[in-house]
Every structure is written in C-alpha cells, then in structure tokens.
Image (cartoon, rainbow, N blue to C red):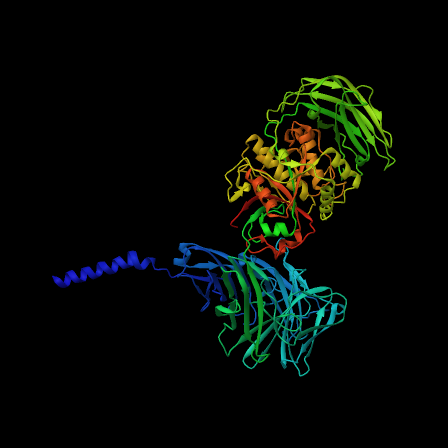
Amino acid sequence: MKKTCVFITLYLFVFFLLSCGLRTIPSGTISVRLTDGRQAKIEGFLAYDGNVLVCQDDRLDISSLQAGTYTLVLWGRAPESPEEYNDFLWVGPIELSRQDIISGKTLRPETWEPVEVSVEERGLTEGANESVKCFFARFIDARDTALYGPFPLNRAIAVHAEGIEGVVVQDLSTQTQVTQRIDWTRPDKRYTVDYVEEEISSLTVAFDRREVSPKSLRFTALPTEEGYMVYGGEAYFENETGLFELLFGQWEAYRWEASFYEAGTTYHIRSREPLRLDWSYLLTIDLGGALHLTKVGQPYYTINERIQIGFNDLIRDAYDHTVHILSENRDSRCFYVSLEREGQLVFSGRYAYDESFEYLLEDAGAYTLEITVDTEAWQGRINREYPFEVIKETGAFKIANSFGIGGWENIPDGFLWMTYEAMKQSHISAWIIDRRPDYVPTTLAVIEIAHEKRRDITLSIGTGNPESPNATKTFFNYVQHGGDLPFPENKIVLDITDLCPIQGETVTIGLYDSDINAETGTLLSFSIEITEGEGQSPIRTYYATGLPIATRNGQTVTVRIEGVQAPEARESNLTSKLFESSRLPTREELEAIERDHLKLEESPPIPSERWDTLYEQGAIRVIDAYVPENRRREGAVDLSTSKYFPPIGNQGDKNSCVAWSTGYYVTSYYNAWNHDLDLSGAEWIPAGGVGYPTEAYWDKLMSPDFIYHQINQGVDEGSAYIDAYQLIVDIGACVWGYKPYDLEDYTSYPSEMAWRNAPLHRQRHVNAEMNAIYYISCETDGDIDIFKNLLRDGYLFTIAVNSNFYSRLSQNDLWHTRNYDVILTNHANTVVGFDDEH
C-alpha cells in the first residue's frame, strides 16, 4: 500500500511539473529560415542594456530575456553558399514577445528589402582574384563606421533597412574604396559603384620618426557626413622611411585613423578634423612626433562647481592629432591624476580612456591639477600641470536671455547669473521704464500717410493755437527710424490722451518731410476718435477736411480739426515712486551716458543734437537712490517665477534683442501685472528655427516685431535701447497675435489692428513730465542696492552684455569677475532677480 502511494505521489508530482512548471521554462531562439524551408547559417548578436548575446551554432538564444524591444545585428547565408559571402543582413530593432522568448522567433529574409550592388568595368572590377568586396555601412558617429559583410556583387541581398545607411565596395588589389548612401525611399534598390582614374590623387602619409619609428602602419579612410563618398580605404604599409603612399579621390572630405604596433602596445592616431582633397594631386598628412597633453579645464571656477576632465581626447601628437594607447603591458587605467590646493594634496587617482575625473570644489584657493600617462615605447612618461583658481563671489543677479533654452548655456533654462562684483567691474548700464496699472487711452489720432521713405517723416500733434500750442506730442523722431521703406497702405493709430483735456480746441497735425531724399508724400486722412476704453467703439469722431495734402521737402505741412472735445485722462494715482527717486542728469552726466551708449555695438551712435533734444525734453532721468515700497528687504527675489513672467523665447538670428527685452519680457510682464493676467501656463514651442508661445496667450504677450520694425532703419542690424523704450512709452506695444514674430521679416509695418492694440499697453504716466526713461550705471555697492530695491518692487530692467562671453559661463551659468571682464557690449538681456547667497 505504501509503495502504491509513493508511486502515485511521484506520478502526480511529475505531472504537475510537466503541466505547470516545466512547460513555462523558456527555451526560445532566433533563427533564420530560407524560402525553401532550410535553416540558414547565421552570425551576429543582440544588444540590451550594455550587454550582448552572441549567435552560437546558427541560433541566437533569447531564453534569458524579458519581453521588449532589442537591437539585433544578424547576417548569414544559405548552407551551400561560399563562407566568404553572405546573403542577408538585419541591423535594427526587433520586438520580442513573451511567446517569442518561450517558443522562439523565426526570421524570413524574403520579406526584407532586396538590394543589388554592381561595379563599372572602367573602375572597380570584380575579378577572379575576388579582390573586390561589398559591405553595408552604419555611420555611428563622427569617428566610427560599422561595416557588415562581405556580400556578393551583382546579386540581390535581403536587407532589413533600419540602421543601414550606406553601401561600401572595396578593391583590395588597388587599395581603393567607394562609399555611397542608400536611399530607402527609392523603390529600385540597385546601386552601381564606380570611379574614374581622373578622380584619384596621390596622398602621402608622413610619419615623424623622431620619437618612435614604426615599420608598418595601417591607415583607414572613412566617409564624413558630406555625401558618404570615399575613394581609398584601409591599407597596410611596411617600409623604413616613414612615407606611406595611398590613392584617394578628389573633391571629398575624409576622417581617418592610423595605427601601428610597437613592443606590446598598439597606438591609434585619429584625425580631429576632416581632411579635404579639393585641389592637390600631391597631398601629405603629417603625424607622429613628440606627444603632449592638450589643454583642458578652465582657469577659474567658483565654489561648488565641479572640475570635469575626460581622457579620450587628451593625448595629442606633434600635429595635434588624437592618440590612443592600448598596451598589453599594463592596466587600462593608465592616467594618473593628482590635485593640490595651496600646495596640499587633496586627491589622487587612476583613470582609463573611457572614464572621466570629477571633483567638487568646495573651497576657494589656488589649485594645481597634474595628469601623467605612460606612453610606453613612443615617449615614456609625459605629464602636464593645469593651474586654476577657485574664487568666491557671493551675490548675483538673475538674467533672462532671448536665445531660447539650451545651446548657449550649460543649464538649459534660458537664464544666466552675473555676480555683483562683475556688474560693477564691467560698469553694466540699465534702462528702466515705469509701469501704470490703471491707464486707459481715450483719445486716438487716426492717420493715413503715403510716402516712399518713412525715415523722412516726423509727425507732431498739438492742441490750441498752432503758433503757441498748449501741448504737443511728437512721433517717429527716433535715433533709428523705419528706414528707406514706404509707409503701409493701412491707417496708423496713435494715442494722444497725453494732450487731454481738450476743451473745444483746435487739434493740429504737422508732417515734417526731411530733405534727405527727394521724394515727397501725401497725408491722405486725419481724424480723432474719442472712446470710453478698451474695445469700445468711438463715441465721437472728428475728421479733418482739405485732404489729401502733399508734403514738401524740408518743410512742415499742417492740417487742423476744430472744436475737439476730449475728457481728461482717467487715472487715479498721479505719483510715481520711480520719478520721485530720480532727477534730470547734469550736462556732464548726459555726456557720460552718451559715452556709455558708444559701448553698445548693437546700437548706432546718437547724433549730438538728438542728445540735446532728449536733455531739453527731460526724457532721460538718472536714479541716485531708491527706497522700495516693499520694506521687507528680502535677500533674494526672482520675478521670473511670478505668474506674470512670459516663457523664455528665442529671437533666432535676427538682431532684435532690444525689442525682445523691452517688449516681450518687460512690457509683457508689466501688462500682466497691470491687469493681473496669469501667464504661468504659457510655453515656448520650438518651430521653424525659433518658435512661438502657446497660442492661447497670443493676446497677452507682446510682439517684439511691432517694436523692432519701427526702429531698425529698415535693416537687420539692431536697434537703440532708448528708441525702444520711447516707443513703448509714447505709442505702446501690440500683442503677439496682431504682429507674430517672423524670423525672415524685419521691415513690415504693423497693421491697423496692431496700431489700435498698442495704446492699451503703453507704459506711461498721466503727467507728461513723468514719462521718462530711467538710467543707472552700475559702478558702486550703492548702485547694486538700487538694482535690488527696484527688483523688490517688481521692476524689470534691460541691460547690455557681450554675448561672445556666453561661452565662458561657469558650469552653473555664472559670470564673475574672471570670466566676464569686458566693457564693449553687443546684446540686450533682462534682469529678473537677485540672490545675495548665489
């Protein structure tokens, strides 16, 4: 009875294993079946997470994997095919299901792309000696090309397309190679590879034998991204002179690698730049000579930055080619690193080529990094010292750029920082305008002008007696104007609420047409609209009669409208903290501002008479001190995190940085603050080289082009800060939707709707005397305090920097006194915050 029970128990256990456990043990493989059902002979591998599974016995065991997507490289042939040729190739991703891993996956080449390669008789010739071979190529990066093959010529090869980019044919007898790109969109995959004798020139590889004298050299030419055509491929040389001859084609660019073996060590010498054979039939590549370690690191770092050194490109020969040393005689970690601070060792270690040295710099002081490497037979031990300084400058301003996110910076957020000390050292100047939360335009002048040269026209509107007006407002009197381009065919709408109240008086428009150009124009229409606020239709409109009227060179023509009634501007707060904290500059200070303006490479010189006018009008005021209404004295303020701040934008290669700072950043922020608009959901969408903000916010963000096109003289060469802010104060700025930013356009004038929208976003004061542009030059700690106090009260300001120094930003995107020590500037940025501990 016991034996029977034991037998039944064993039987049930085995049945359980077969039905449950053993049945789910994976045993799958990848194999290839030919059309006739036979199993193909295969080689290759499958890559995953840095590991590889290699084919064995014409199968690839995948039973240890999980379901997912992997990279498969597989080639093979029919059982009867010659071993030196293959019939099919797969390079690309493969999806493996759980069922594939359990039961296996069979690939069938007849479903892949047929590709046929042939050669011309006059060039590469398939001879009986089988010296001509065909390969398929995958261009991995700027240094490496993977070749798979060889494959037979003049016969269709089954190729899985993904991952394969070119076809390579080599003629071993003549040491030549031709590479062509495969166009997978072409229905016919037949490629004829050819070259002619006239396309071949002689290249000499000259090895400088002063340090080491290799008797043999392997030289490999690889295609660059330029057309993927290479004449001349891999060649082996042996001689005693160091001069190695090779044939190459003209009009092509090559990457190359040379290598030789010496006393247990293999040396690889690589080109750092492509070699172009564009005209010479006798070209020499020099390599070899004394080895050295190239310059790495920076001369200055700041506290809590990391020094980072890679070794892959560190060793150079006498001609600045990269050298890799692979020795059988030593550990691969051949780079010895030591770091000293103030003469005391703080770190030492060993590294391999594919590793990098990193060290957190927590203490200020003078450091010396020393790197040593043993080059074995070539030159023995070589070393180099890299002195640098770690500095501590506490306190910095946060700055928004208009070059988009990434590319120009190290931390991809669109911002950089500048220390207080660097600001003072470089005498950074700032331009500021006031903001008004309750301004409503009520009186608009609507004008239509025909003139071929808009730079010639200056327009003024006054009230009362034309000979001695009560008030006058002038337009288009910029340092840089609209250029030698015509006025638009649409009407121009200008806000003249500044002139109110108008109590039954005469309103006169004057058009001055300069004699710079011979052309004259015509004032086609002029009217005045009285409105009750934003989006409201006019409650009254007054029209001028006697039009059209022609302009006259060097003279002012006038047109009047009688009996205009317009109410006083509706603003409740008549004070300005910014105005009360400022004063008119002295003549000497104005001359200093003029000299400061000459540092701006992106702005043209301002004529002296224009400076005189600005001085007489009180258009520029200087700030000596500013006590914020916000008395909390925070140690850090970041207005870019406010819901009122727009997303970081990208001006592209148009020279509109001033309009981006003053219009897109500053005026968008002020407008959102004025009306409590939430911009936090807006994003910048990259497209067409630059991009655009989220379309739902096009009615809330300001257009840089509305400003830039009016003040760039009709050419894309930048604009003046004072013009941009004067335009925003006098005219306003329209929203993005009425004048979207266009990278290819820098001349078109705004539409009538854009002109009508602009007054709603004027940053002006009801008191005309307070419509000033404010200026500060940062030279003292007191100036730093003014900047910080303005930011505490929510003011942004435009500064001028030198964009050539973005490449010198620290790892944390910081400019300090060592990496920003320049006076000349060429780019506008926007200060958005500060941090006393940064």
Height in image: 425 above or below 214? above
**Which quadrant would residue 624 be assigned to in this image?**
top right
Q: Where is residue 538 in the image (x, y as percent from the top left)?
A: 67, 19
Work out which residue is located at the far left of the displayed protein and give it: 1
Relative vertical location of residue 660 with respect to residue 425 in this rendering, above or below: above
For image coordinates 51% across by 45% down, the residue present is 635
Q: Residue reaching furthest bottom?
A: 240
Residue placed most toward the observer, 63 or 765: 765
Q: Is residue 294 visible to us here? A: yes
Q: Which of 19 and 732 is in front in this view?
A: 732
Q: Which of 407 and 207 is in front in this view?
A: 407
| Quadrant of the rendered image containing residue 617 | top right
* Left or right side of 409 for 560: right
Residue 646 visible in the shown view: no
- Viewer-nearest residue: 826 or 93: 826
The residue positioned 62% from the left and 80% from the top of the image is 212
Residue 18 placement (x, y as % from top left): 29, 59
Percent coordinates x, y for residue 603 in the rendering: 73, 45
Report x, y in % for residue 197: 75, 70
